[in-house]
Image: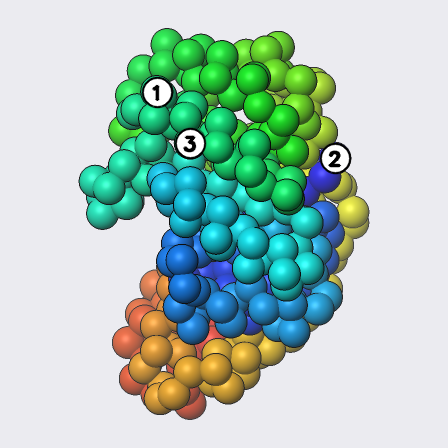
Amino acid sequence: MRFYLAPMEGITTYIYRNAYHKYYGNIDTYYTPFVANRKLKSRELADVLPDNNKATPLVPQILTNKADVFLEITSQLQDMGYGEVNLNLGCPSGTVVAKRRGAGFLEDPVELEKFLDIIYEKSHISISIKTRLGIDALYEWEDLLNIYKRFPIKEMIIHARTLSQGYSGTPSLEAFKMAQDTLTCPLCYNGDITDIASYKKLIATCPDTTAVMLGRGVIANPSLPQILTADNITAEESQDSFRSFHDELLEGYRDYMSGDQPVLFKMKELWTFRSQYVDIDKKTLKKIRKAQSISAYQSAVEEVLTS
Ligand SMILES: Cc1cc2nc3c(=O)[nH]c(=O)nc-3n(C[C@H](O)[C@H](O)[C@H](O)COP(=O)(O)O)c2cc1C
């Protein structure tokens, strides 16, 4: 099985990806959160610059519904040495969808097909796609698959939910299976693989699965790929890796951002995910959330790590 780290805006930054790769690895491909501007903003540029991504096998992701913008960004990425880009057809955020981008583009299959016609004809780089199943009904998926099968898609990553499901509700393994029966390009499953039980269910329902993209499950528990491949890791090893990873991430953000507050915001966000996986004493978690300085934050984290 190949494992990919999901792109997560604001979370899987190059600082996160590099620290993750150093202390955990077990990821075959990393994806950047989407870039969307013809002239990349400095944050977008920093995230894709090869100098910032020396160690990780990386595919940059693009969010747009304009073929000329896609081609322009793609050509800049190609100049940096990338051989593949990923098209985002899954983002459910209101502002993105309102502009008919991300999952919002799925609402207009005619325009989507025209867009794909142009980018697959004019691009000199491999294009993979990350898609949802449609806007709100599963019959839309069948129509989308009929469009997708016309194109030389490098790989199709399927977040098996509709736009209206957002990040809740149950992903449809049947829809993924339908894609396996319809498309000939390589496929990757994405959605709610957070533990051995969810992973086993996927494999039992879709035994031909060869790649899985992991998002929130890894942010909560960075050892997840190891756990899924049944590598025996002791609780102690897991705690040691987490501490080293955490400290490197904290230092990375302190170097990159000015002032404690933005750094604390980034780190606290991770604890929100982590607390869904690890049982953390409520009082200590509150101390992490309320910390106003790096030193207060560090001593609260120390309490969790030594408890
Ligand atoms: C905070 C957040 C940011 C995300 N940003 C992106 C993004 O930039 N591009 C993208 O394709 N998906 C994005 N996603 C979706 C994830 O990549 C993934 O498809 C989704 O979380 C489902 O996988 P999971 O259940 O393993 O988390 C984001 C999700 C979250 C929660």
The quadrant in which residue 195 appears is top right
Q: State the separation of the CA atoms marked 3 and 1.
A: 9 Å
The residue depicted at 51 percent of the width and 59 percent of the height is 12
The residue depicted at 62 percent of the width and 10 percent of the height is 181
- Badge 1, how many Cα within 10 Å: few under 14, some, many 20+? few
The answer to whether any part of residue 161 appears in the image is no
* Residue on which disc 3 sits: 115
- Asked which secondary structure carries label 3, the reply is helix
- Amino acid on which disc 2 is placed: Met
- Asked which secondary structure carries label 1, the reply is helix
* Residue on which disc 2 sits: 1
- Asked which secondary structure carries label 2, the reply is loop
The relative height of residue 274 versus residue 98 in the rendered view (above or below) is: below
Please state the horizontal and vertical placement of residue 78, each as a whole percent of the image. 62, 55
Q: Earlier in the sequence, mark 3 or mark 1?
A: 1
Q: Earlier in the sequence, mark 2 or mark 1?
A: 2
The relative height of residue 116 versus residue 15 in the rendered view (above or below) is: above
* Residue on which disc 1 sits: 110
Q: Is residue 258 left or right of residue 303?
A: left
The residue depicted at 49 percent of the width and 27 percent of the height is 117
Q: Earlier in the sequence, mark 2 or mark 3?
A: 2
- Amino acid on which disc 3 is placed: Phe
42 or 300, nearer to the observer: 42
Q: Is residue 232 left or right of residue 141?
A: right
142 or 231, nearer to the observer: 142
- Amino acid on which disc 1 is placed: Val
The relative height of residue 126 versus residue 175 in the rendered view (above or below) is: below
207 or 28, nearer to the observer: 28
- Badge 3, how many Cα within 10 Å: few under 14, some, many 20+? some
Q: Is residue 99 left or right of residue 64?
A: left
Please state the horizontal and vertical placement of residue 169, each as a whole percent of the image. 35, 28
